[in-house]
Each structure stands twice: as C-alpha cells, then as structure tokens.
Image (tube, helix red, strand yellow):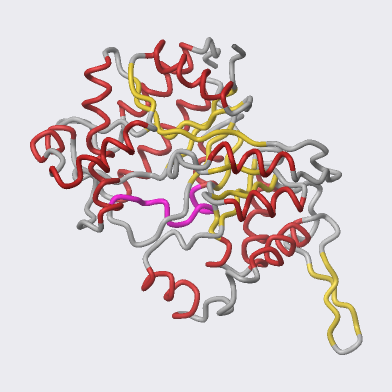
Amino acid sequence: MSTPALSVLDLVPVRQDQTTGDALAATRSLAQVADRHGYRRYWLAEHHNMPAVAATNPPVLIAMVAAATERIRVGSGGVMLPNHAPLVVAEQFALLEAAHPGRIDLGIGRAPGTDPVTSYALRHGAGGVEADAVARFPQYVDDVISLMSPDGVGIRVGGDVHPLHATPHAVSAPDVWLLGSSDYSARLAAERGLPYVFAHHFSGRGTAAALDLYRTGYTPSAAHPQPRTFLTVNVVVAPTHAEAERLALPNLASMVALRSGGPLAPQLLVEQAEASGIADAHRGLADEMRQRWVVGTPDTVAAQIAALAAEYDVDEVMVHPVAGAVTGTPANRAPAREATLAWLAEAFGQQVA
C-alpha cells in the first residue's frame, strides 16, 4: 500500500476559553507544525456567523498563514464564490500568488457557508453580488481564472475593448480547485479540466460516485492533462485509543448541534463535553458521523488513512484535525491538534524540517 502525501484543512475553531485572537494564534502555530512536518498544503475554510468558527475570510487567513510559514502551500477550502464578486476574488488571490509565488491554492465552492440571513447580508445587504449568483457559478469560475491569468481579460464597452487585470504584472497564477459535496462540482470540474475535491470529511456519502463521475467525464486541459483529486477526513491522534476518543468529543458535540438545529456555541472543552454527553435523541446521528472519522493511535490512524487513500485511489489525504482541548490549555494554542499532525507525520515517516 503506497504512502499518501498529507495536507491540512483548518476551520479555525473557537473554544469556550478563547477569543478570536486566541483562535487565530492557535491556527498560526498549527500551520507552523504542518510546515515543519512536511505537509503538502494548508487550506482554510469560509464560514460566517458561527460562534465556534473564526474562518470567515480565507484570503486574510491565507496571508497570515503564508507569512508565518516557509514552504507549505496555503489555500482556501474554499472560497464560496456566490458570496463574492469574481473580480474581488481574482484580485485577492492574484496578490497572494504575487507575494508567495508557487504556494497559493484557490479552492472554490458553491455553498453559502452560513445561514440564510447571513447569506442575504453577504450577497445583497451591503451592495453584495447579483441575485442569480448561484446560477451563474460556472461563468464566475471562468471569470476568476481568466482575471487571474497574466493576460487578464478584455471587456467591450461602447465599441472599445478595455483591458482588465487582477494585478498589474502577474507572472504566475494560483492553482484552482473546485470543491463540492454533490455531483454538481464534480461535473463542472471534469468539464473545465480542473482539479476537484469532494467534501468527504463533511458529507461522507457519495464520495466514490462523485470521484468516479469526475474521472470518467474528465476533459483534459493544458494546465491539467489528467484528473487530480484528493480525500478529506476528520482525524484525531493520541497515545491511546481511549484518549483519542475523548479528545474527539468537543467537535462531535459541535457537529451534532449543527446538524440537529441545536444552539450553536463556542466549542466545549473536553471535560465539558464529557459532562454534557450526547442526548439520546441524537446518539444515532453522532454515531453515524463518528464512523466516518479516523480516531486512534498514530499507527492505527496512519493505516486507516493509507487504506482510505487506496480505496479512493488518491495520492493525497487532507486531514482536518478535530482534537479538542482540556481545561488549562493555553488559550493561544491547540496542543492536541498540533500533536495529531506531528504524530501522524511521524507515523508516515515524514521528515521534520
């Protein structure tokens, strides 16, 4: 069984004992651990108006993480494109690529990443973007890619062609990936000849079908003559299986609240999650979600990840480290998440810089 490359997905979780600034500091430290331990890329999500998630603005977070690291690729997992004007996204990522050439990924998604009220505020309440932004998603993807290219685009106005560039003198462009949890983005990525990632860590259902749809329908492009994808998975690693299961409880409680319509709050500490437990009415939901996670000791987790990579025929796995924090943990660090990355890299034999 071959050894997959490892990458990281980070939602910038906010615990009960943290401010937003603390959560950002913890993400900086986590990214530096990933950088030192040979992880391939570090992606940051876009979610809005969620008390337990500080990843509201991927370009800002990418700039912070890229500046704090040396070699790892940094990107969005992803930018929810219907929330934004394509030119704004293109300008942001063209500048990031100029500042950190060869290290920037632009992962693009179609979901709102928030509740309906916040979605309205993003798209319409302050000027926003056009009302049919979701329907125009394929065109928006094309626009972003064209605008980021060194040649830019030409816009015809009043019989004249006006050049439009995302940045004055680009010499390279970010890698663009399409993300999704249904077959829509799989079909679009195949049609456009773009890399594609299915949100296995979140959905867990339909992964094989989506990847097969993408691969069988793939149209080669100049930049990507072959289909390119990887797997995402929630992971907790600890010295013992029992400790790993314990550290998984806070994130599991947050996901149950999200999926069941319960009140959202900053993430519990481990002891709080143990004391609260999971309501009997939601135990089935919790067990179903937990079955898709990879939780255990370094060797057992590494073996399961390698098996998943073989099952889905991918050479890269993006881990979402979901280990919680115990009482007394420094507010500006996430030691159990850092340890998950370090132990996993060691189990796979990755070198520490």
The span picked out in magenta is 52-61
Q: Is residue 12 above or below residue 145?
A: above
Q: Give the x, y percent position of residue 226.
A: 79, 36
Question: Toward the viewer: 61 or 116?
Answer: 116
Image position, residue 172 (x, y; %):
78, 46
Residue sitting farthest toward the left: 275
Q: Is 211 left, or right, of 283 in this rendering?
A: right
Q: Camera-side residue: 78 or 98?
A: 78
Q: Quadrant of the N terminus?
A: top right
Quarter that holds the C terminus: top right
Q: Is residue 138 above or below residue 71?
A: below
Q: Dominant secondary structure of the magenta stretch?
A: loop
Q: Position of residue 275 (x, y in %)?
A: 8, 36
Q: Is residue 63 visible?
A: no
- Outermost residue to the bottom: 158
| Residue 201 visible in this rendered orientation of the protein | yes
| Tally of numbered discs | 0
Q: Quick one: 175 or 249, which is closer to the camera?
A: 249
Q: Nearer the viewer, residue 288 or 264?
A: 288
Q: Is residue 189 magenta?
A: no
| Residue found 53% across the figure and 36% down from its top | 42
Q: Quadrant of residue 286?
A: top left
Residue at x 59%, y 15% (from the top left corner): 3
Q: Quadrant of residue 202?
A: top left
Residue at 18% across / 33% down in the picture?
Answer: 270
